[in-house]
């Protein structure tokens, strides 16, 4: 008979602990993703202080993978900001898309040394990002 209370107690403990795992808590903020059109100037300011932007020729391409991923989210936000009313901004977004595509298609995320087509792709990304930032900075927030 002494085994019954231990078994019941053990079962209750399992149920109590199982309930703890389902407690609702604060939802962590989403990381990355495409910035909204009004967040675009802030995102561009942050990207243009990155070393992969500031000195693309000397960076190790594989070390710029996160930067390129973040930059890759920018053209969509720029197109939303342009909203079919700003062909210049749309054109700059297309240039940035193309430069990011060149980096990715060359497999640069695994290249451990500066130089060659991957460094050139980083230079092209920096130039396209500069052009897009110039267009965004010349326009008021919200389009």
Image: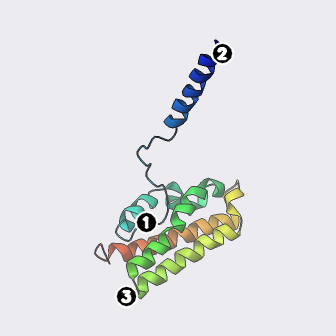
Which residue is the site of mark 1? Answer: 35
Instruction: Give whichever of discs 1 and 3 has the lower sequence position.
Output: 1
Q: Nearer the viewer, residue 87 or 5?
A: 5
Residue 70 located left or right of residue 139: right
State which quarter of the image contains the N terminus.
top right
Q: Residue at x 58, y 29 (%)?
A: 14
Image vertical order of residue 33 relative to residue 25, above or below: below
Q: Nearer the viewer, residue 31 or 47?
A: 31
Q: Position of residue 82 (x, y in %)?
A: 39, 81
User: Disc 2 versus disc 1: distance between alpha carbons?
Assistant: 60 Å
Which mark, residue 85? 3
State which quarter of the image contains the C terminus.
bottom left
Instruction: Give whichever of discs 2 and 1 has the lower sequence position.
Output: 2
Q: Position of residue 19 (x, y in %)?
A: 51, 36
Q: Position of residue 78 (x, y in %)?
A: 43, 75
Kind of element beneath mark 3: loop
Residue, far front: 1
Residue 98, image quadrant: bottom right
Image vertical order of residue 86 relative to residue 65, above or below: below
Which residue is the site of mark 2? Answer: 3
Residue 43 located left or right of residue 63: left
Instruction: Give whichever of discs 2 and 3 has the lower sequence position.
Output: 2
Image vertical order of residue 85 relative to residue 5, above or below: below
Kind of element beneath mark 1: loop
User: Disc 2 versus disc 3: distance between alpha carbons?
Assistant: 77 Å
């Amino acid at each position: 008979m002494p085994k019954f209370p231990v078994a019941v107690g053990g079962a209750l403990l399992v149920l109590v602990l199982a309930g703890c795992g389902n407690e609702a808590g604060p939802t962590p903020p989403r990381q990355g993703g495409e910035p909204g059109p009004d967040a675009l100037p802030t995102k561009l300011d942050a990207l243009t202080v990155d070393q992969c932007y500031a000195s693309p020729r000397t960076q190790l391409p594989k070390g710029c993978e996160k930067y390129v991923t973040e930059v890759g989210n920018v053209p969509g936000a720029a197109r939303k900001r342009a909203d079919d009313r700003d062909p210049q901004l749309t054109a700059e977004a297309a240039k940035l898309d193309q430069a990011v595509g060149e980096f990715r298609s060359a497999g640069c995320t695994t290249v451990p040394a500066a130089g060659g087509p991957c460094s050139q792709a980083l230079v092209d990304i920096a130039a396209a990002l500069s052009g897009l930032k110039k267009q965004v900075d010349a326009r008021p927030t919200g389009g």
